[in-house]
């Protein structure tokens, strides 16, 4: 991920490298870049109210699409935020809303433990997992997260992070399981990120 920002405006380039030989998309090699996303955004604040708008272009193997989003947050206990995404291309008319809360606990002068919880609502045309062809509109998934940031020098930060994603309804679980490589609807995942800012 590479981001350039100035006066609230940002441009981000994000890419994913698939290194798992156990799964591949038919017709494509497994060890390759399988997604590249480009985001243009603007973020600002008015007193304690934060806001942002943006556009994302997703270049995914076999299907490209794009969406717009808007987000608001408030600087108070648990830092609540709300973001909505609306697809205008391959999934035109589909939308996804996410509400999140979080809190940062100071561990040392330079380190903090960040905990978060988010829940989402997803609306997809003709994607009911029963196979009826009906629309799907449900509270979709929740995500619990934990991370600790370790500054290394002036510009580098190392962040171990872990997440637990789980469905918010039986119907959501069916849809998530049907789209999953492992046929699961619950996932624990994580990793270590390194960010370099100047």
Image (spheres, grey):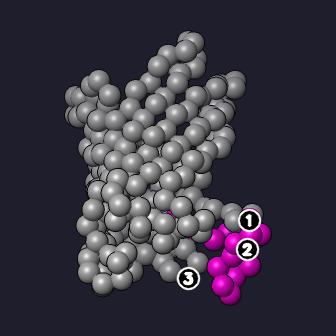
Nearest the eye: 106 or 47: 106
Measuring 25% from the left and 33% from the top, which residue is drawn there? 74
Which mark is nearer the camera, 1 or 3? Answer: 1
* Relative to 63, 30 lies left or right: right
- Quadrant of the image occupied by residue 100: top left
Segment colored magenta: 20-37
Left or right: 28 in relation to 85: right
**Residue 188 within the magenta-colored segment of the rendering:** no
Please give the residue where the numbered disc 1 appears in the rendered image: 20
The spot of residue 128 in percent (x, y) is 32, 76
Q: Residues within 10 Å of mark 3 (few under 14, many from 20)?
A: few
Is 75 positioned to the left or the right of 113 in the image? left
Q: How many numbered marks, from 0 up?
A: 3
Look at the picture and state if 148 lies above or below 29. above
Task: Report the front residue among 129 and 77.
Answer: 129
The disc placed on residue 125 is: none
Q: Which residue is mark 3?
A: 62
Q: CA distance from mark 1 to mark 3?
A: 18 Å
Labels 2 and 1 touching (C-beta < 8 A): yes
Q: Nearer the viewer, residue 28 or 182?
A: 182
User: Can you identify the residue that label 2 sits on?
Assistant: 30
Q: Secondary structure at mark 1?
A: loop
Q: Is residue 150 above or below residue 145?
A: above
- Whether pointer 1 and pointer 3 mark residues with C-beta atoms closer than 8 Å, the reply is no
Residue drawn at the location 26% of the way across and 81% of the way down: 134
Secondary element type, mark 3: loop
Residue 83 on image: x %, y %: 30, 51
Mark 1 or mark 3, earlier in chain: 1
Dot 2 or dot 1: first in sequence order is: 1
């Amino acid at each position: 991920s590479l981001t350039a920002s100035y006066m609230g405006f940002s441009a981000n380039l994000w890419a994913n490298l698939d290194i798992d030989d156990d799964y591949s998309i038919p017709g494509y090699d497994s060890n390759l870049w399988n997604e590249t996303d480009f985001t243009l955004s603007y973020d600002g604040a008015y007193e304690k109210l934060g806001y942002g708008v943006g556009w994302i272009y997703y270049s995914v193997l076999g299907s490209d699409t794009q969406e717009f989003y808007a987000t608001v947050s408030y600087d108070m206990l648990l830092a609540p935020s709300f973001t909505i995404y609306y697809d205008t291309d391959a999934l035109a008319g589909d939308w996804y809303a996410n509400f999140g809360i979080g809190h940062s606990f100071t561990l040392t002068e330079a380190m903090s433990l960040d905990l978060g919880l988010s829940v989402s609502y997803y609306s997809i045309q003709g994607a009911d997992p029963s196979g009826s062809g009906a629309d799907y509109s449900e509270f979709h998934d929740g995500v619990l997260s934990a991370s600790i940031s370790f500054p290394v020098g002036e510009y580098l930060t190392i962040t171990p992070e872990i997440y637990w994603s789980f469905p918010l309804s039986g119907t959501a679980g069916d849809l998530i399981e049907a789209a999953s490589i492992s046929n699961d609807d619950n996932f624990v995942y994580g990793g270590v990120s390194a960010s370099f800012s100047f």
